[in-house]
């Protein structure tokens, strides 16, 4: 246990703590004295505490377990997105929030970004750096990204939906996609955006 804690990059921890302190002071200076926003910095401190617990917890987790169960994590993420469609709260014209105990809110579309990265990486690692085949690799991964894209799009959250396309494009590029396939993908995305 102590060995794994020693392997944590101290510089990253220091930078994260500095950013946390600066952001909390910035939020406090903007929201202090405003009736609807007063105390918002306390909520952010709770989010940071949860984040750091998750950060430390991940150091004890073997990443190969995440890769092994990537498909189940992906399905869990899809389930969360579907749940938001029925039980989610609307904020900023987007129905994408779940209320948690303690007054905290969770936006599954944001969490799904991490899930999608994990899932696509787990699928691509099986290729062992060989060139991706269009119909066998690129199209199935595109369809598996399209499904959450459409769910989030129906929740009126175009920003998060488009981020899934960017994640897919980035991982396909890292995963050794052929240049011709990348060009076809760019044409499709550009045509969709124009449409």
Image (cartoon, helix red, strand yellow):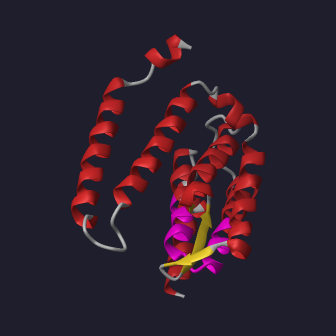
Q: Residue furthest left?
A: 29
Q: Position of residue 165 (x, y in %)?
A: 56, 64
Residue at point 50% right, 77% down? 190
Whether residue 171 is visible: yes
What span is in magenta?
Answer: 148-166
Q: Quadrant of the rendered structure where residue 21 is? A: top left
Callout count: 0
Residue at point 57% right, 67% down? 185
Q: Nearer the viewer, residue 7 or 164?
A: 7
Query: Magenta stretch mostly in which secondary structure?
Result: helix
Q: Position of residue 108 (x, y in %)?
A: 61, 61
Residue at point 69% right, 39% down? 127
Residue 194 forms part of the magenta stretch:
no
Q: Quadrant of the rendered structure where residue 61 is? A: top right
Relative height, residue 133 to residue 96 (above, below): above
Image side of residue 18 versus residue 187, left or right: left
Relative height, residue 2 to residue 164 (above, below): above
Q: Residue furthest top?
A: 3
Q: Nearer the viewer, residue 80 or 28?
A: 28
Q: Position of residue 60 (x, y in %)?
A: 59, 24
Quadrant in which the C terminus appears: bottom right
Residue at point 57% right, 80% down? 156
Residue 165 forms part of the magenta stretch:
yes
Image side of residue 53 versus residue 44, left or right: right
Whether residue 139 is visible: no
Q: Position of residue 52 (x, y in %)?
A: 46, 37
Relative height, residue 41 to residue 89 (above, below): above
Quadrant in which the N terminus appears: top right
């Amino acid at each position: 246990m102590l060995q794994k804690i020693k392997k944590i990059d101290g510089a990253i921890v220091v930078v994260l703590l500095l950013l946390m302190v600066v952001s909390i002071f910035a939020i406090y200076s903007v929201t202090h004295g405003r009736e609807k926003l007063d105390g918002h910095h306390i909520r952010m401190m709770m989010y940071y505490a949860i984040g750091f617990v998750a950060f430390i917890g991940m150091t004890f987790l073997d990443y190969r377990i995440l890769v092994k169960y990537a498909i189940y994590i992906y399905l869990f993420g899809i389930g969360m997105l579907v749940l938001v469609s029925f039980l989610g709260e609307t904020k900023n014209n987007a129905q994408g929030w779940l209320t948690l105990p303690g007054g905290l809110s969770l936006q599954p579309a944001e969490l799904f970004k991490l899930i999608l990265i994990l899932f696509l990486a787990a699928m691509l690692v099986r290729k062992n750096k060989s060139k991706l085949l269009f119909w066998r690799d690129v199209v199935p991964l595109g369809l598996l990204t399209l499904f959450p894209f459409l769910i989030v799009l129906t929740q009126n959250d175009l920003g998060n939906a488009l981020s899934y396309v960017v994640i897919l494009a980035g991982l396909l590029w890292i995963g050794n996609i052929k240049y011709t396939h990348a060009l076809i993908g760019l044409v499709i995305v550009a045509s969709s955006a124009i449409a």
